[in-house]
Image: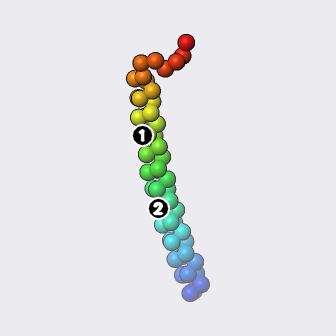
Amino acid sequence: MGEFKRVVNLGKQLRGLLQQTRVEFEFQMDAHAARTEMWLADFATEPDVGFE
């Protein structure tokens, strides 16, 4: 029974780590999307983008 409890606790720890990793990944992706939107806005307001 002690071994089963240990496995359950390891599973809970792993699930917590995976949730934390997912949250950090989503935060990084949101930051990347915001930087991309800023870059596109800057690009769109350039007077001459050179597409002739």
Residue at 46% in and 56% down: 24
Relative to 34, residue 26 above or below: below
Residue hosting label 2:
20
Q: Amino acid at mark 1?
A: Ala
**Residue 47 horizontal/vertical position (percent):** 42, 18
**Residue 44 horizontal/vertical position (percent):** 43, 23
Closest to the observer, 20 or 9:
20
In the image, is 7 to the left or to the right of 34?
A: right
Q: CA distance from mark 1 to mark 2?
A: 21 Å
Q: Amino acid at mark 2?
A: Gln
Residue 45 occupies quadrant: top left
Cβ–Cβ under 8 Å for marks 1 and 2: no
The quadrant of the image that shows the N terminus is bottom right
Mark 1 or 2: in front is 1
**Residue 18 horizontal/vertical position (percent):** 52, 62
User: Residue lying furthest bottom in this view?
Assistant: 2
In the image, is 27 to the left or to the right of 3?
A: left
Closest to the observer, 16 or 2:
16
Relative to 25, residue 48 above or below: above
Tag shown at residue 2: none
Circle 2 SS class: helix
Residue hosting label 1:
34
Question: Pointer 1: residues within 10 angstroms few (<14), some, or many (20+)?
Answer: few
Circle 1 SS class: helix
Residue 52 occupies quadrant: top right
Residue 34 occupies quadrant: top left
Residue at 47% in and 43% down: 32
Count of marks placed on residues:
2
